[in-house]
Image: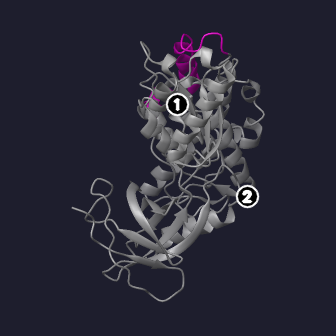
Amino acid sequence: MACSSGSNAKMSSPNVSTPAMAVTPDAVDQKTCPAVFEIYGKIWNVQARLGQGVSASVYRVNSGRASSAVKEFQVDAQGGDYGYLKESSVLEKIQGHKNIVTLFGMFTNHNPFGVATHCLLLELLDVSVSELLARVNNQGHSMWLIQHCARDVLEALNFLHREGYVHADLKPRNILWSADDECFKLIDFGLSFKDGHQDVKYIQTDGYRAPEAELQNSLAQAGLESDSGCTTAVDLWSLGIVLLEMFSGIKLKETVKSQEWKDNSSAIVDHIFSSNAVVYPAIPVFHLRDLIKSMLHNDPKLRCTAEAALINPFFSIPFAPHIEDLVRLPTPVLRLLNVIVDNHLYNEDEYEDIIEDMKEECQKYGTVVSLLIPKENPGKGQVFVEYANAGDSKEAQRLLTGRTFDATLEEYPSLQGNHTYTFILNCI
């Protein structure tokens, strides 16, 4: 049964009634989801609910070929809109950095029952670090991926901290990959505050909470106040835990709550790295270990800053991505395997015909910017297809995987016989 509720939204214009629009039943919760949002006079269909918290829900929406995210805030217990005002205010002030989610605008949504909710129109991002961690089966991520994530998040934090803000809820779920920009970005600034002017008693998420924030939360629960508020150092603690989880492939929530961790976290970090020595043979992981340790001092004054962390020797090592990295992180480029045999690379007529056939096939799924089939290594015989955007690339990957390239088989009889040429794809 399709979602039948309708909604409309506005910036400052009068309320305009909008008819309900159906959404596929497996995409969203039929009972509570909006079917559409009207944003700046344009109808956006709700495709899926991406997340739901106490104060807000996030939806993937599209209008034509454009896709975005909408964060819809619920009215709080006091009938106010504190959460919306807080996050929108912070986001407006920190726009323009490539590693921070882009805010496109703000609007008010009116559902058929007359309830108004405030919304943010945001850049649509892809896979989160939380999802990446769920896919590694306790093996840990490659050093390239850890380095990429660490650098991107530190760049975001360095900018955020220079602007005088503390993120205050850094965790894997709030670090997302942008396929279009090919980098990680920070999201969710609902707990953020100006350094030195903390206006939120309870900050950070269990498992990623710095010791001073843990103490502050405990005092607040007892009706007491700490002598000083938390600082930007809490973000570095959280990132240290995230990187340690990415390296080990293990969720550390219970570990960091243990007395053993509180007594000697440095020894536990050493143990985790020594236990993974076989996984990373001949790779100088001690730079990463030292970087993580510098973020996990119990005393926030001893923790490294984001600016200092960015010049750690770990970031001078030229790691290369693994094939698994290329598959897990969507980009605008696809690599097609097992399509071309060597003898067709050196027959110029056949080579050009294959390129044209491949381009024609790939253009069915989006605008192809370029298509390359290298005749020599690296990449010899592989097909590299660059789409205009990552969305088309992802759709092509989904629809082409496992497909036989019939045009090639029909046009070039020498490709037939005992061979089956199939699209086997991965993103690069």
Badge 1, how many Cα within 10 Å: few under 14, some, many 20+? many
Q: What residue type is labelled 1?
A: Asn
Is residue 54 visible in the rendered structure shown here?
no
Magenta-colored stretch includes residue 60: no
- Position of residue 313 measured from the top left corner of the image (x, y, whole percent): 76, 26
- Position of residue 7 measured from the top left corner of the image (x, y, whole percent): 37, 76
Q: What residue is rendered at 57% in x and 24% in y?
A: 142
Instruction: Check disc 2 and report the residue beneath it.
Output: 163
Judged from this view, the residue extending furthest toward the left is 1
Q: What residue is rendered at 48% in x and 52% in y?
A: 217
Nearer the observer: mark 2 or 1; the answer is 1
Q: Quadrant of the C terminus?
A: top right
Magenta-colored stretch includes residue 271: yes
Instruction: Check disc 1 and report the residue beneath it.
Output: 426
Q: Which of 388 and 317 is in front in this view?
A: 388
Badge 2, how many Cα within 10 Å: few under 14, some, many 20+? few
Instruction: Magenta stretch: give its range.
Output: 255-283
The answer to whether residue 159 is left or right of residue 73 is: right
Q: Tell me where residue 235 sits by quadrant.
A: top right
